Image: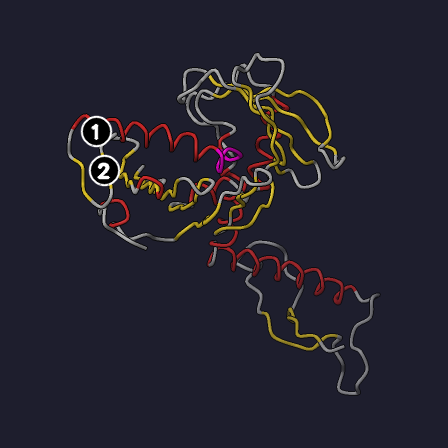
Amino acid sequence: MILIGFEIKEPPPFGGGFFGGGRIFTLLKYPPTSTSGKRRFSTKNNNYLAIMRYLLFTLLVIGLFTTCLNPSQSSEDESEAAYGNPPAEGFNLEASDPEAIAWADSVMEALGGRKAWDGARYFRWNFFGNRLWYWDKYTGNVRVEIPESETIVLYNLKSEEGALSQKGVEQTNPDSLDVYLDKARRGWINDSYWLFMPFKLKDSGVTLSYLGQDTLPEGKPAELLRLRFDGVGVTPENGYHLWIDKTDNLIKQWAFYRNADNPEPGFITPWVDYKSYQGILLASSRGPNYEIGDIMVYDSLAAAVFEDLNWEE
């Protein structure tokens, strides 16, 4: 086999120049041959072994030099590892079980990773055919369309301000506006949780407990977590049990407890039919007749979505 390498005029010591010793490197073919066609070196030749050692050293230096010139890939890999899944301010770290936290981090990674979730900005989904939502995660702007009552509400989750339209006519009466803006706030808290809950396991006010191993209805092994709230949301007394499929680290079932201390759940439903949207996984099915439809994650949305009551897609 013919390889291109470097010939060192004399074996140099390390140091004394970028490649060591200030020696000159020239291209040659390996194995080197004499003019008679015979190999110039053998494995017993000390000079040949020295050349091979310094050839490896040179390639290492070149690799490091290339990395310095183009550090973007290594920096990206390091940033992914360093990004992690930090808890939100107010997450109850002290009262949460370390094993539960570790499983929450595994779920986030399986969903596409925290960096991908934080980078996703614009969302759309239809909550069981009742309410169509648009959400700008960065600004807190939401738009909800309710076909049954021909109602459209524009609302900002941070400022709590917005606008209302019913049957195509904007409503400005303060009393009516306040009622519907509050309905939009409460509706968003509920409807968004039914889609994004797996990304919110370390949210503010949450305490996670590890309940041990269990099985899913089809017999797959699962890890069971309990999620409780403290002073957040519309109904902080609620609680959930979550089943994590150990084969892929995704939540596949949840149970709702109207009061977290209740012995029996109010309901248990699957959490299935995951699909990838712009690098994150979202699950659309909560069982027969409970499908979250029209799921989209957008790179961008027109400002009119959140500003114009008459906007149409």
For image coordinates 27% across by 44% down, the residue present is: 306
Give the amino acid at mark 2: Leu
In the displayed structure, does residue 16 sit left or right of residue 155? right
Image coords of residue 123 (percent x, y): 40, 45
Residue 301 in the image: x percent, y percent? 32, 52
To which residue does mark 1 refer?
176
Mark 1 residue crowding within 10 angstroms, few (<14) / some (14–19) / many (20+): few
| Residue segment shown in magenta | 194-199
Amino acid type for the residue under numbered disc 1: Ser
Above or below for 55 versus 188: below
The residue sitting at 72% across, 75% down in the picture is 30
Disc 1 to disc 2, C-alpha distance = 9 Å
Q: Residues within 10 Å of mark 2 (few under 14, many from 20)?
A: many
Extreme residue in the right direction: 44
Q: Are marks 1 and 2 in contact (CB under 8 Å)?
A: yes
Residue 115 belongs to the span the image colors magenta: no
Give the labeled residue for mark 2.
164
Compare residues 232 and 88 and report the one nearer the observer.
232
What residue occupies the far left of the structure in this picture? 173
Residue 255: image quadrant is top right
Q: Give the structural element (helix, strand or loop) at label 2.
A: strand
Magenta region, mostly helix, strand or loop?
A: helix
Q: Earlier in the sequence, mark 1 or mark 2?
A: 2
* Left or right: 51, with 240 as reference point: right
Identify which residue, 7 or 151, lies in the foreground.
Answer: 151
Residue drawn where x is 80% and y is 67% of the image: 45
Identify the residue at image location x=43%, y=19%: 235
Horizontal side of 69 relative to 160 (left or right) equals right
Q: Closer to the camera, 2 or 298?
A: 298
Q: Position of residue 258 (x, y in %)?
A: 52, 18
Where is the C terminus found, in terms of image quarters?
A: bottom left
Secondary structure beneath label 1: helix
